Amino acid sequence: MEQRVIDTLREVFELNGFIGIETRAIEQGSSLLKKGETSKEIYLLSRLQEVGHESDTPVEQRLGLHFDLTVPLSRYVVEHSGQLPFPFKRWQIQKVWRGERPQEGRFREFVQADIDVVGEGTLPEHYEVELPLVMVGALERLREFGLPKATVHANNRKLSEGFYRGLGLTDIEGVLREIDKLDKIGADEVASLLVSECGATPDQAKACLELAQITASDGAALIDRFDGLCEIHHIDMDGGDYAMAKEGLDTLTMIVDEAARIRPGSVIADLKIARGLDYYTGSVYETFLDGADSLGSICSGGRYDNLATQGSRKYPGVGLSIGLSRLVSYMLHSAGATASRISPACVLVAVWNEENRADSNEVARLLRARGIAADVAPTAAKLGKQIKYADKLGIPYVWFPNEDPADDGPDQVKNIVSGEQTDADARSWEPDTVYAQQTVKTNA
Amino acid sequence: MEQRVIDTLREVFELNGFIGIETRAIEQGSSLLKKGETSKEIYLLSRLQEVGHESDTPVEQRLGLHFDLTVPLSRYVVEHSGQLPFPFKRWQIQKVWRGERPQEGRFREFVQADIDVVGEGTLPEHYEVELPLVMVGALERLREFGLPKATVHANNRKLSEGFYRGLGLTDIEGVLREIDKLDKIGADEVASLLVSECGATPDQAKACLELAQITASDGAALIDRFDGLCEIHHIDMDGGDYAMAKEGLDTLTMIVDEAARIRPGSVIADLKIARGLDYYTGSVYETFLDGADSLGSICSGGRYDNLATQGSRKYPGVGLSIGLSRLVSYMLHSAGATASRISPACVLVAVWNEENRADSNEVARLLRARGIAADVAPTAAKLGKQIKYADKLGIPYVWFPNEDPADDGPDQVKNIVSGEQTDADARSWEPDTVYAQQTVKTNA
């Protein structure tokens, strides 16, 4: 199931010209801790031979497991900048790890599927609408597995920051962090935190929450609502703060209008999206599934202008990441998708007795040569037991080689789901399409 | 490149009815250390928050990264024994990790590709020839990437042990460990080690080396040579030691004869194969490539009867493992294989000016809808620069949308390798087969 989802995403990413890369799971501590990520649950490594002396080495010089695919990408881009074609579009699907408190005896290991485009020095704005649309296209393809419709909710950090500053607030990171909690703790709680933690007056807190309530599916409506709110709160529309907000507003307007033209209903502006602790500098995205509010965002990202730097040279990027393990788990448990059957084999070839195993092997060889996955019964047990083995593996067909070598009559094949049994020749027989589709390309 | 190799192996494994599983990379220390593997370079984990207190937890209760895929399989089988169909045939392709001394500042992270079949209580012997043959078939498929012919060299632990005991030796593990060094340090050195480390007389050491020199491609020759050596060294052919050796000899005879019948030249008996430190109890395999002696074995394994146990219940298995990263590296550097081109895209659609980007996007959309991977130029730079970008990415075609919207003339497409430029319609144009083959399914 997860494998089929990965194959589908990979196909969409490559159709769109993204280059697949894989980075090592182990990075230097200095690289993992670079962006102030000390709050992350990072796993550090030590060799069995080092037990008792782990702490002799400073954390920055130790090794650790990557906790996302964006930090490794920024390391990779700087390391290979001489060879890479910029803008560099890459897809990457890998496991990442985050620790949990040891008393829970648990750890978190999950697969993320990322696309990013990274420029050298500059990066055109059109990627800020193209990348979310590639993800929407990919998620659309997953609807065949029962996934509901996905909608990207976009915002822009500059828009929020300009507005907050226009109100007279200065702890921008603090405000973003609290706004990020809206879905979890509700507006009243966020309002008191804005006052107690970020130095906001009750009126400023109210204005922040009003901003967070704005949504729009076209640019004109977005501008209307945002400018209206600025007027209500007396934000100087000739001042530098509004100018900053306007920069973000223009980008967001472009995004929703372009998206509406290309794929209506796929991207909306939603000014509560904050992505609290991350390294984003402009556009930010979260993605929600119809009827799956409790799942939260399944695909998030944004534009980051300062993550990768090399001396004075910057590598601005924009990217989105699907939390694949969580998504697949949702698809299996809630979205009506079912796991593939256990065995990839389409046919189990029966064995009459061990002396004739070679005949059964030959049938399997002929089927495989034509792309039909086949297994051979493990022992020459009673036929009922062999059929039960096929059933337990979810193999739909059992093949009976012609029992009497003296008689050159045909083999037979039984569909153990329908019970139908027919003559068959391993050189030409084809399974019903509905079963054939599940073979080989299907992963258990 | 590695991705294409993985896809090929997966296809062969599934055609043969192996079930794909993935196990977590992180295992309990107790599970990793179970089989006396303290000599392995295991990586242990600690949370960033635990720095300074790592050693408060006993190693068995800590977490670590798996160093192979066989130990995790044995844990998995025991944990899921109630649900698994036995014999359980599984393939698994994953990264594994082994530490190196920190002063080298290095670590080893590589991909292994394993197939195993695990029985419940018993496991029929025919799998001991079938699994190496599946691997030979898989390696055969890799010859299209430039891999030389592979030959499996098989031996049997019981044969070796019976012979050594028949000679009067008792430190069987010691002898196997020294014999395992033959290719590295040569016969003279091994002979002195057998005397100094394993308590062998010079005559016993000589007999061990003579056994290690026996190879055979058919069962009759094998029996002839083995029995001849037993006679020379006065091993009692009615005694228990010979009976033990005979058990291994019978299995090995079956393997080479069956393999010769099904795929001549694929498997030979080679009595120097020892697999020194591992958990094998019967058949052992190593695989060598023609003309690549220095590479050593690229696919090894064997039968293990005691690795997975649950109370008194045993889960005997047989399996082989390809060291995939090493193999791919060899294919790229020595076997004449070349890495895929950088971008998976087949076409780069040019952009005349930013106002017409939507037209270029629409061409790309039409091509992708027909399975042709396409990228769009990042900026409306001068045409020469756009063509250079395609060239750097290894994209063979550049598409020119009809420049003048007033004129409904056709688009054009240029093959930047041949220089040929023709009229084209994104709804029907097809790339030359040779390029089309590289799209989408090809990974960078």
Image (tube, coloured by chain):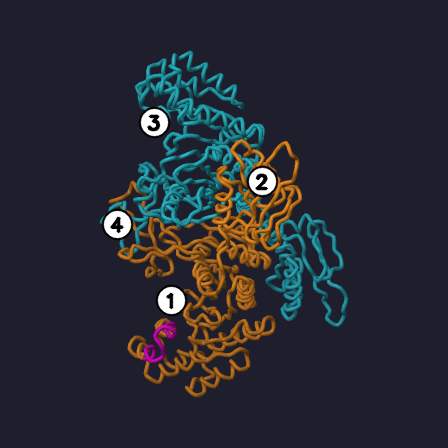
Chain colours: A cyan, B orange
Identify the secondary structure beneath mark 3: helix
Chain identifier of the residue bearing label 3 in the image = A
Residue drawn at x 57%, y 72% as measured from the top left:
B259
User: Are labels 2 and 4 on one chain?
Assistant: no
Q: Quadrant of residue B219?
A: bottom right
CA distance separating discs 1 and 4: 28 Å
Q: Tag 4: residue type?
A: Glu
Q: Nearer the viewer, mark 3 or mark 2?
A: 2
The residue pinned by badge 3 equals A173
Chain identifier of the residue bearing label 1 in the image = B
CA distance separating discs 3 and 1: 56 Å
Q: Which residues are magenta?
A: B180-191
CA distance separating discs 4 and 3: 35 Å
**Whole-percent x, y for residue B51 in the image:** 27, 44
Q: Nearer the viewer, mark 1 or mark 2?
A: 2
Q: Nearer the viewer, mark 2 or mark 4?
A: 2
Identify the secondary structure beneath mark 1: loop
Residue B364: mark in rendering = 2
User: Residue B428 or A156: which is nearer the viewer?
Assistant: B428
Residue B277: mark in rendering = 1
**Whole-percent x, y for residue A49 in the image:** 28, 56
